[in-house]
Amino acid sequence: MNLEGKSVVITGASRGFGEALAKAFAKKGAKIMLSARNESELQQLAKKLKCGYFKADVTKQEEMNALAEKAKEKFGAIDIWVNNAGIFTPKAGARETDWRRAHEMMETNFFGTVYGCLAALPQMRKQGSGVIMNVLSTASLEGKTRISAYTATKFAAKGFTESLRLEEKESGIQVFGIYPGGMQTHLFDEGKPDSFGEYMDPLKVARKAVKNLLKEKPKLDLVVRRPIAKSKK
């Protein structure tokens, strides 16, 4: 896929991996629409990248629909929609987890992804083409200790992604799952793990995700894991 002039909508785009994706897509000549809840951060990044932005909350379906309308008005099409917004709570075992916060995670990480997909689909179906990229996590691939709630939200998003891919198989719409390992982003602001310094640079991961789209046969599921540190002899 040639990304020059393609319209790209990115949620959770004001910082972290969303910001990195915006930079990576812009580098390839794509037209970007940034979206997040923090308008001041959106304005700063939009000014830097010379692109559009729209303040929206992924947990509110009507705001995702409004984002899709804004993108359609600005670009005339929605070529790529990236569901990136996500939150993470401090590590805790299942018995210690604050399950009220877990509900917030499910609203953002799962339903936010669902609402984004549903907002993009009508225009993409009308076009007969489009790419939906759902940013998941390696926590979507196997159970992990002390992040059971987060893992559950990402498992749910993975299941939805795979099911939607099958449903849209004949529509011309491709549904991608991106599975990054730990990255050095604000996601861990509430509690950085001891190994945070070994986490990946989000821009490098974003470049891999964008590079995958450029391939003749891109991977529908792209897993990007942290390099394993070599043991000292």
Image: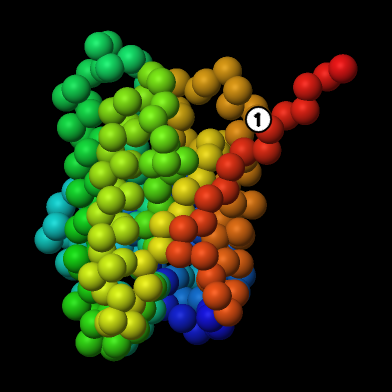
Residue closest to the far right = 233
Report the front residue among 222 and 97.
222
Rendered view: 229 above or below 191 = below
Report the front residue among 75 and 127.
127
Report the front residue among 21 and 132.
132
Apparent side of residue 138 relative to residue 216 in the rendered image (left or right): left
Rendered view: 32 above or below 40 = below
Q: Residue at x 41, y 63 (%)?
A: 176
Give the image quarter of residue 109.
Answer: top left
Q: Tell me if mark 1 has few (under 14), some (14-19) or many (20+) residues whose alpha carbon lies within 10 angstroms of its own.
A: some
Total count of labels: 1
The kind of residue on which mark 1 rests is Glu
Q: Residue at x 31, y 57 (%)?
A: 161
| Residue 185 percent coordinates (x, y) | 51, 38
Name the quarter where the C terminus is drawn: top right
Task: Note whether residue 151 is visible.
Answer: yes
Q: How is the image coloured?
A: rainbow
Q: Residue at x 58, y 79 (%)?
A: 216
Rendered view: 109 above or below 172 = above
| Residue 158 percent coordinates (x, y) | 33, 50
| Residue 32 percent coordinates (x, y) | 44, 71
Q: Residue at x 57, y 66 (%)?
A: 212
Give the image quarter of residue 89.
Answer: top left
| Residue 201 percent coordinates (x, y) | 63, 43
Which residue is the site of mark 1? Answer: 198
Rendered view: 135 above or below 191 = below
The kind of secondary structure element at disc 1 is: helix
Apparent side of residue 6 relative to residue 63 in the rendered image (left or right): right
Residue closest to the far left = 62
